[in-house]
Amino acid sequence: MPGEPPIRRPPSWAWLAVAATLAVQIPYPLVDGTSRAALTIISVLTVLTASVLHAAATRGPRWTAAYLVSTVGTGLAVETLGVHTGVPFGRYAYGGSLGPRVFGVAAVVPLAWAMMAYPAYVLARRHEHAPYRAALLGGLVLATWDLFLDPQMVAAGHWTWSASGPALNGIPLTNFLGWLLVGTVLTGVLLALPDRHRHERRDEAIPLALLGWTYLSSVLANAAFFGRPGVAVTGGLAMGAVLATGLRTWRGDRRDVPQGDP
């Protein structure tokens, strides 16, 4: 409409990072061993690159720097606590297949927290006027994504569990609760970061496309390639419900949110 400010968009070449993610993840089920481990690490880097490029273009370099410090720092802190105490996820240990470790944590893992925390935040931001609900929504995105991630990484030998108690698809339920707790707090932190572009319209297609691809590819890979129908069903139902909920417009949400800025 005339007089409206332009939509803040990432450069078109930022989509190359999304394309690289697809190029890396599509052959993932077809390889194994060190090749699969290498694709895992590269995939984390491509998704994180896409998130950083989008954040810098739509939220500015200061917000992006704060986002990286918050997510990578939190990821390293909670994973270090986890491997040494079992809190909050349960007892587990990393192998050496994901490269160098920091304080007993594979160095790529805090980057994985950062890569998915941003798309989760973008979805949660649709409901920022109900901050507690928005933070919980982001936590649920991360926790339900891990319903796919953890069985896949354990099967690949990247880490092992020694926790006892109730489990789902071989993964302790304490892990889901830990992810939900950390993801909710982390989303809340991102929602609270100063954002001078908060009221501007933004093209959020890249992070939402990453969420959609992660969900659909995870369901397909577990159902058709990994032979884990239980993971496909539980992760598919849980994450699908969370994404559908996040994409809804709730009563009381802001009514003037433009289509380009979910």
Image: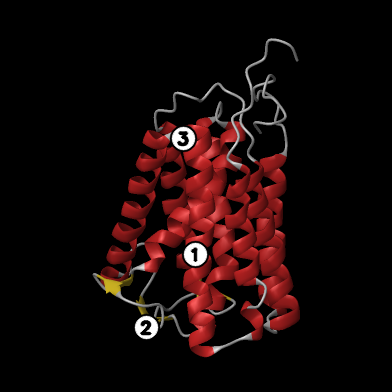
Q: How far apart are marks 3 and 1 (CA)?
A: 23 Å
- How far apart, in angstroms, are the residues tagged by discs 1 and 2? 17 Å
The amino acid type found where label 1 is placed reads: Val
Instruction: Give the image location of residue 137, x and y in percent.
Output: 57, 44
Q: Please give left or right for residue 89 compared with residue 140 in the image.
A: left
Q: Mark 3 — residue? A: 191
Residue beneath label 2, please? 95
- Circle 1 Cα neighbour tier, 10 Å, few/some/many (<14 / 14–19 / ≥20): many
Judge whether residue 178 can be spotted in this image. no
Give me the residue at 53% from left, 67% from top.
43
The amino acid marked with disc number 3 is Leu
Classify residue 71 as left or right of residue 52.
Answer: left
Seen at 46% across and 66% down, the residue is 175
What residue would you read off at disc 1? 44
Local SS, label 3: helix
When the figure is inspected, residue 37 is found, relative to residue 245, above or below; the finding is below
Quarter occupied by residue 124: top right
